[in-house]
Image (cartoon, helix red, strand yellow):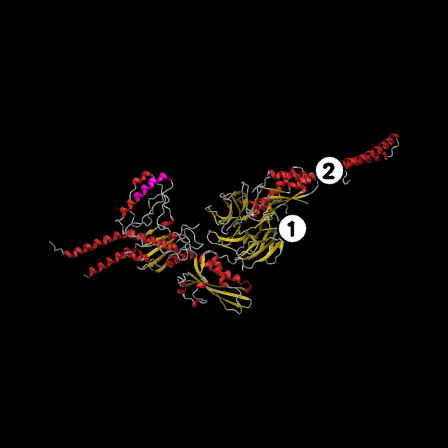
Amino acid sequence: MKRLLTALMSITLAISTASAWAQLTIEISQGADNPTAIAVVPFAWQGVGVAPEEIASIVDGDLARSGQFAPIALADMLGNPTTEAEVFYRDWRSLSAEYLLIGRVSSEPSVLRVDYELFDVLRQAKVLTGYESGPASDARMLAHRVADAVYEKLTGVPGAFATKLLYISVDRVPGRNDYSRLTMSDSDGARPIVLFDTHEPLLTPTWSPDGKHIAYVSFETGRPAIYRQEIATGQREQLTNFSGLNSSPAWSPDGKTMAMVLSKDGNADIYLMDLATKKLTQLTRHYAIDTEPAWMPDGRSLLFTSDRGGKPQIYRYDLSSGKTDRVTYEGTYNARARVSQDGRSVVMVHQAEGRFHIAVLDLVTNRMQILTSTDLDESPSIAPNGSMVLYATKYQDRSILAAVAVDGEAKFRLPASKGDVREPAWSPYLAR
Amino acid sequence: MPRIILRPALVTLLIHGLLLYLLTANWEATEREIIRAKPAPNIINARLVDISEISKLKPAPPKPKAVTVKPKSKPKATPPKPKAVTPKPKLAPPKPNPIPKLKSKPTPAKPTPPQQSNRDAFAAIVRDELTTAAAQQQTTVTAGEISASFVSLIQRTVVNYWSRPPSARNGMECELSIQLIPTGEVVNVTLVRSSGNSAFDSSAINAVQKAGAFPELQNLPSREFEKNFRRLTLIFKPEDLRY
Amino acid sequence: MKHFTVASKAIALLFSAALLVACSGSDTKEEDEAAAAAAAAAAASASAAQSAQAAQGAAVSAEMAALEEAAASAGTVFYFEYDSANLTPEALDALNANIALLQRNNTNVRLEGHTDERGTREYNLALGEGRANSVREYMIASGIPGFRIETISFGEERPIAYGTGEANWSQNRRVELKLQ
């Protein structure tokens, strides 16, 4: 009997293990990609007097503008924890928050320190801790760095909030030429500083790869010329003085060469200038208009606009072979290409059915996607992390700046002052 | 003649027979059934229908393990319940769909009649064929079909809650093992195989955590629940990203 | 009598030539007679030249005034089609009137090329230059020397008409001729 029982038990075991092998496996191959709900709780101010900036609200704004996050409204928050001990996950779970960011701001003499902690509400665990410190006058930049750290932790992509923007602000002056101001601001439009101003046209502001210099086209002498300016000192240098066009400056990725457009030899062509020797090399020799050079991140080729085929399209010039190939075939007009850091996405101005949009072309799949639904869009500039595109557009008869995510989803407009704002240029990642 | 002890002999025979059966039966059961179907609503199943085919149309019994029912419908016919997987719903996504009826297999939506009049004729023919096929199916619902519809439900719910990070790429893959209880609640989520991208892994785990529960599973016969749904494996492998 | 006409210049030249011949120091009687004749002729032609010059001066002034008026009424702005640097018949008419005047005077000119706001700024800078060049090439072909013509492009940066729509855009697609 005992042997029978043992036998039966082993058989049952065998049967149950057999059924356990048949585990159901389900494949999930799509997602709805709703923004991630995050609660950014006001940081504690542990210094004396009034806090220099509302760090949490700057972080909140950065994350919201990226389109990846949906911050919980301040009014809905059930508590204001500033240390880990004060965190009750239940409170945040009830708001459907997935993540919680808390922090403390303290100040030593003239130095601000921002400590922060990020919690995963669903798993009830701390996932990130860190701090940023710097001069109190740069408190906004510290907040942007916190936002960058949170963004990178949760998306796997480095944040681009601690960056700067260049743009040209133009005001109409009755009885005089328009007044142009070359302006630099934070990535959210705050703290605008005028770097140069004139009553003549200014075009194509552009950054050096190290973020310390800028270049632009100015008509201050009555003719267009390319100028280079050091941001910290304001020191300027006129790089060109040729007859005809002197325009479209573009720094090579290694910072040693400036691509530009000159028409001194008959018509608009792309040239390279060695910044050390000022020696010129002519790249294109075509009777058509060749303009708007943009370097590929590996520095081995340049994209440019040419109407050699009749209407403006994007072409690529290979520096080693000297060959030119056409890149865009969709649409009647494609111009002013800018390339993402990974060399894969090209944003440009694209005309479809008479309207000018910003479009992105994937160089690997060759698929083009129109990103904007506004009309008369121009001057696209990609963030250094490739996530968003800043551009100029017409809104209520004025030119303003707007941004759209590279996948076309999130959109926002930058705070618009009076007058026209145009020609934005997003800085590279900035050294601390 | 030696005396044969009948009862022990019979038991021994039975045990040996059972062991033999188990040995052979085991081989089939160790293969995992991977439900590879994508949530139907976003796919338009189009098929060029030739008139000559219509008469040959036979009601195909659905395979017990298959989930996507590919209806032999006209172009432009969309499978039912597209709302659950609309991209960009509000922060509180719509509740998962009501319990699928157990009596009939999921019927394809009525094909939208095409514009040209000369196609109306065999649109009608197709419709007739399908309804007769459905009618014939009504009495032959298998346990597998019931499971299939619940799998589809879990799939749709998780898809709804999955927010892929910008660093996600097509082809990335992570595997989660989840544990459910008969109320449908998720009681455990474990990362079994990482994609190599921690933001991607977290997004998958969070998708399940946000879903939290699949209360419709309460309607599942307990035998089916134990067999297939107590422990589940989810493989997150996007195919619809830009690249 | 502001301008010395060609005729009066020629007469003066002849007169001084005669004078030189007369004063060359030769002492033949023939030369004396020639000198006397030349002097008489010169006196006669001088008065003739004076009246001729007056008449011609009046005619020239009238002609110039007519040319100036034609150019003024044609205007110094030449318009273009969208995305084109080709001279339209209307532009050519206006241009011809201006060229006719320029062929008779010495003024230097500056051609300023412009575009409407559509499209990218740098491309429009080059397109504006293309338009100014079209006008310049036509002027050179019509006999105006290149050194008298300066070109510059402002692209879309200096519109005449701010605002969207063809009514505004058509006013901005232009080359302006400015006298230096």
Q: How far is disc 2 from disc 1 in space, using C-alphas?
A: 39 Å
Question: In the image, is residue A422 above or below residue A99?
Answer: above
**Do we see residue A212 in this rendering?**
no
Residue A221 badge: 1
Q: Residue at x 59, y 39 (%)?
A: C88
User: Residue A254: horizontal and vertical position, in percent?
Assistant: 55, 52
- Disc 2 residue type (three-letter): Val
Q: Which mark is residue C60?
A: 2
Q: Of discs 2 and 1, which sits in the foreground?
A: 2
Residues behind callouts 2 and 1 on a single chain: no
Task: Please tell me which residue is depicted at 37% across the width and 46% down the height of the picture.
Answer: B44
| Residue B219 visible in the displayed image | yes
Judged from this view, the residue extending furthest toward the left is B1
* Magenta run includes residue B124: yes
Q: Is residue B17 magenta?
A: no
Determine the secondary structure under disc 2: helix
Q: Amino acid at mark 1?
A: Thr
Q: For this rendering, which residue is in front, A221 or B165?
A: A221
What is the magenta range? Answer: B116-129
Image position, residue A324 (x, y; %) = 53, 43
Out of C79 and A256, give the one closest to the viewer: C79
